[in-house]
Image (cartoon, rainbow, N blue to C red):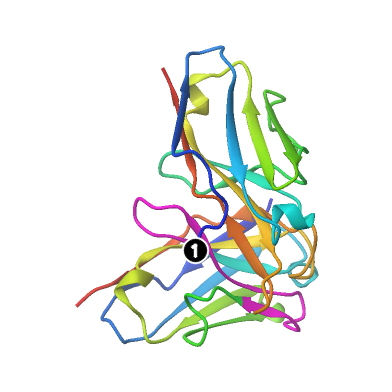
Amino acid sequence: EVQLVESGGGLVQPGRSLRLSCAASGFTFDDYAMHWVRQAPGKGLEWVSGISWNSGSIGYADSVKGRFTISRDNAKNSLYLQMNSLRAEDTALYYCAKGDSSVLEGVGNYFDYWGQGTLVTVSS
Amino acid sequence: QSVLTQPPSVSGAPGQRVTISCTGSSSNIGAGYDVHWYQQLPGTAPKLLIYGNSNRPSGVPDRFSGSKSGTSASLAITGLQAEDEADYYCQSYDSSLSGPLYVFGTGTKVTVL
């Protein structure tokens, strides 16, 4: 059974940093691209970042580019999101999601499994 | 940064058929990228409902169906049931000059009357 468990969320002041983690199990982690998707309170889904199976390809939404860094450790079956210079508009539930393929680019890429999310609140 | 447009809400009585549209552009759906659909029940994480425009993952009832044409896609729910009351999102890929970019629809709340 595929399991994705996020951690690291919490209350943080604007301008500070936070690091999210996602522990994966139930599938061959280094065969798949992984992603972070967020959902602000009462709002829709927004793709934040994705990383290919070997970290060779990485992408970011324009809203986080230059502030967030995605990484993975295939030996530990773990995905990370380093979030710097946090803003109030980064407040959201952050989901870890498994890609259906090993790469980021593709005609038909989607997210076939999701974690339960970790809440990040940016406020003074 | 939703670039896929969905109606905010649709409703129907039990047993009826409802459809949700997802309108994109020439850089995403119109460029030939597939459309996928997710169901988000209240207080839960999104769940994959339709992939590759019209394919259902194992366990998804055949009441749910998807289609794509041009720069748009649709999700249909036939024989609407109370448990279908949820938010639904479409998703595709956008060929942005700044790199790989995944885009979601604005979301549609389905209400069972």
Say which quarter of the image contains residue B60: top right
Q: Which one is in front, A118 or A122?
A: A122
User: Which span is picked out in magenta?
Assistant: A38-59
Image quadrant occupied by the C terminus of chain B: top left
Q: Is residue B46 above or below residue A121?
A: above
Residue A108: tell me if it is visible.
no
Residue drawn at x 53%, y 43% as measured from the top left: B6
Q: Position of residue B61 (x, y in %)?
A: 69, 26
- The amino acid on which the numbered mark 1 sits, given as a three-letter code, is Gln
Q: Residue at x 73, y 75 (%)?
A: A52
A31 left or right of B6?
right
* Residue drawn at 57 percent across, 33 percent down: B20
Label 1 chain ID:
B
Q: Is residue B34 above or below residue A12?
A: above
Q: SS class of the residue under badge 1?
A: loop
Residue indicated by mark 1:
B1
Pinpoint residue A58: horizontal percent, then vertical percent.
67, 80
In the rendered view, would you say B17 is above or below B22? above
Whether the magenta-drawn stretch holds residue A100 is answered as no
Q: Nearer the viewer, residue B78 or B69?
A: B69
Q: Is residue B109 left or right of residue B80?
A: left
Indicate the position of residue A99 as horizontal and vertical percent values.
70, 61
Q: Residue at x 63, y 63 (%)?
A: B102
Label 1 packing within 10 angstroms: few (<14), some (14-19), many (20+): some
Q: Is residue A53 magenta?
A: yes
Q: Position of residue B44 (x, y in %)?
A: 46, 45
